């Protein structure tokens, strides 16, 4: 996705890191972003381990620029979303990263763990920004999402 508009020197080029193992969900996110005129680079990692390598530039992986936010599935192989979130929160470079959980899990234990790890929003799939924020967050999650990115055309 091309970038929608230039950003000032105070803000890095906006981007989204999508950590998702289901290709249909990746396509759904891409469609919803387009439908809402959010035209920023979408970087895709298939699991938490791959995302961490991309963020840190480990194991020969090219280090990506710090994303504006991370959209993170919980249930993934190798390193699940909550494990990645816990790792990010313990790393000084990524502790303040805005992370939105998107998951099919409606388990209270997952919600509590995400809340403990200072998640920005929790969305139950299937993802639709029309109902963004209904997955347990007490704020208008989609508005926060747009405010964080400042990307909507």
Image (tube, rainbow, N blue to C red):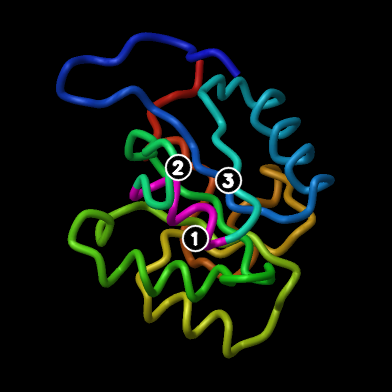
x, y (%) of residue 67? 39, 39
The residue beneath circle 3 is 18
- Nearer the observer: mark 1 or 2; the answer is 2
- Looking at the image, residue 7 lies above or below residue 88: above
Question: Within 10 angstroms of label 1, few (less than 14), some, or many (20 or more) residues?
Answer: many
Give the main secondary structure of the magenta stretch.
Answer: helix
Image point 23% across, 26% down: which residue? Answer: 11
Q: From the viewer's perspective, is 117 left or right of 42? A: left
The residue beneath circle 1 is 121
Q: Which mark is residue 61?
A: 2
**In the image shown, does 148 or 59 lie closer to the viewer?**
59
Mark positioned earlier in the residue sequence (1 or 3): 3
Q: Quadrant of the N terminus?
A: top right
For this orientation, the residue located farthest to the right is 24
Image point 49% across, 37% down: which residue? Answer: 16
Image point 56% across, 57% down: which residue? Answer: 72
x, y (%) of residue 123? 63, 61
Element type at marker 2?
A: loop
Mark positioned earlier in the residue sequence (1 or 2): 2
The span picked out in magenta is 48-56
x, y (%) of residue 63? 37, 38
| Residue 29 within the magenta-colored segment of the rendering | no
Mark positioned earlier in the residue sequence (3 or 2): 3
Tags 1 and 3 touching, CB below 8 Å: no
């Amino acid at each position: 996705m091309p970038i929608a508009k230039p950003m000032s020197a105070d803000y890095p080029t906006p981007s989204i890191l999508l950590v998702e193992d289901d290709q249909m969900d990746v396509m759904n996110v891409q469609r919803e972003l387009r439908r809402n005129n959010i035209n920023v680079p979408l970087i895709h990692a298939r699991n938490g381990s791959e995302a961490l390598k991309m963020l840190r530039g480990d194991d020969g992986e090219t280090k990506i620029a710090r994303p504006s936010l991370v959209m993170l599935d919980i249930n993934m192989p190798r390193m699940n979303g909550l494990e990645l979130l816990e790792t990010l929160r313990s790393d000084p470079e990524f502790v303040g990263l805005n992370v939105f959980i998107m998951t099919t899990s409606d388990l209270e234990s997952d919600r509590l763990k995400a809340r403990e790890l200072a998640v920005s929003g929790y969305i139950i799939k299937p993802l639709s920004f029309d109902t963004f924020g209904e997955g347990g967050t007490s704020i208008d999650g989609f508005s926060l999402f747009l405010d964080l990115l400042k990307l909507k055309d």
